[in-house]
Image (cartoon, helix red, strand yellow):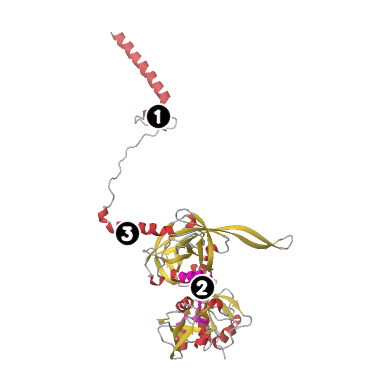
Amino acid sequence: MRDGFRRFSILCFVFAFFFFGVYIFRNYDSEQGIKGLFNFSGDTPGVHRPESYTLQSRPAVNLSDVQILSAFDSELAKLTSAVVPSVVAIDTAGIKEQAFLDTITRRRVIQRSNVTGLGSGVIVTAEGHIITNHHVVADKNSIRVTLHDQTTYEAKLIGYDKPLDIAVLRIQAEGPFPHLKFGDSDKVRVGQMVFAIGNPFGLSETVTQGIISAKERAISDTQRGLFQTDAAVNPGNSGGPLINVQGEVIGINAAIIPKSGNSETFSGVSFSIPINDAVASFKSILERGVPTRGFLGVVMADLSPRARHLLNYDGEFGAAVAEVTPGAPADLAGLEPLDIIMGYDGSNVENMDQLLKWVQAAGVGDEIEMKVWRRGVVLDLVAKIADASASATPFSRTPSANTPLAKPEMVLQKIGLKVRDITLAERARNMTGVIITQIKPNSIADSLGLKVGDEAVGIDGVPITHEADFYLRLAASAAVQPAELVFRREGKLIRMTIPAFKR
């Protein structure tokens, strides 16, 4: 009995030994080592086993608790679907000519290359007229627009307003086309919600939302009174509409301030042309093929505290007349240098830019009543607005070099320097004031050691805002007493006294 049990035990041991030997041989994994031999979870390396999971069946917040947000979300979607069909993508193509000197033949060679562009536009008439930026279509001989339904058409350039950066196209196909209504940009308020629509980086029908951050911004001598917004605008958005909550066009997106060292990305600041300005140019282009601007024939400057003191003017409103063009409407109306225009067509004049904007928007032939202060006496003058494009003397904001030597002009010529406004890129680098561009040899400025490129930032303790303001303050101050000029050179502020001009 015992021998039989012993033989049975030996047989079981041998069987178990060979069984585990085969198991180890078949299941040993060099990556997992010994741990892999005792994996009884049923998972096979390299083979996915379905995971169990439980999803949330209820939202985090009940809809009844966010009714206002829900309605707002629905209204934004409704607004977007209503306006997007009127926004188009613009593809352009042209030939760029570049001249260079051949080093072997020493001849001037013209090299031509194909260039393409991308922008946006908005349809504003049933006939298919589109407003966009001039810089989107400038020097391009092929213009194609793509609509919301991906239909592509050729477009014809009807006309453009280069200073305002506006161009008018027409779709070369039969309408009617979906188009948007013009809003009233004069009623736009800071803080108002707006939407920018366009094709940034070629991404069609992109909608961004923001607010009007500021009004009456200037980025160049001709582009003033712009809207500043924080709605994201990037390359490709140019020419697209700025929309209010009613789906009305209140602006045309035109420019951005790029991030430092990067000209291709939005940094939180963008600018739009107010639609009232664009509409005036748009209608003139449709009627005449070219924009029409009113012309008064004056060089203006804002009233600085120093100018107020020198002119003995304590009024609340007004802009100073620095120069009057002979034979221009202002001259015929009786305006004189150092007059202060207090009122224009029944409205108070708050600053120079506002007045110039009103003049340019006026119709040719309009008779405008002006309230003018002259040496303590208030006069009522009437000027008949002329056409700026037909005027012999172009519109200017700064004293011309050909002005006869008299009064402030004589002072400026004796001092002998010229300046320019800072550019948008310089403004983004926190530069202020004006930049000296020319110094007349043997002049007062030359003898004082002023240099081209110096950044003039103040006169007699008053900050300088633009070149016309600089000229008026300098002439007014140096005509009666020494003028202290503060300028920046290589990051350092330097103060210099310009002696009073002896008549």
Where on the picture, by quarter, is residue 394? Answer: bottom right
Say what secondary structure mark 1 lies in: helix
* Residue 222, disc: 2
Badge 3: residue crowd in 10 Å (few <14, some 14–19, many ≥20): few
Judged from this view, the residue extending furthest toward the front is: 174
The answer for how far apart the CA atoms under marks 3 and 1 are is 62 Å
Nearest to the observer: residue 184 or residue 13: 184
Residue 397 vs residue 75: left or right?
Answer: right
Residue position for label 3: 72
Residue, x 33% and y 56% (percent of image)?
74
Say what secondary structure mark 3 lies in: helix
Residue 340: x and y in percent read 46, 85
Q: How many marks?
A: 3
- Name the image quarter holding the N terminus: top left
Residue 40: x and y in percent read 34, 29
Residue, x 38% and y 58% (percent of image)?
82
Judged from this view, the residue extending furthest toward the left is: 64
Residue position for label 1: 34
The answer for how far apart the CA atoms under marks 2 and 1 are is 81 Å
Residue 78 vs residue 159: left or right?
Answer: left
Say what secondary structure mark 2 lies in: loop
- Name the image quarter holding the C terminus: bottom right
Q: Say whether disc 2 or disc 1 marks the residue closer to the N-terminus.
A: 1
Q: Say whether disc 3 or disc 1 marks the residue closer to the N-terminus.
A: 1
Residue 54: x and y in percent read 30, 41
Q: Amino acid at mark 2?
A: Thr
Q: With respect to residue 48, does 94 lie above or below?
A: below
Q: With respect to residue 83, does 476 lie above or below?
A: below
Question: From which residue to which does the magenta span run?
Answer: 278-304
Badge 1: residue crowd in 10 Å (few <14, some 14–19, many ≥20): few
Residue 127: in magenta span:
no
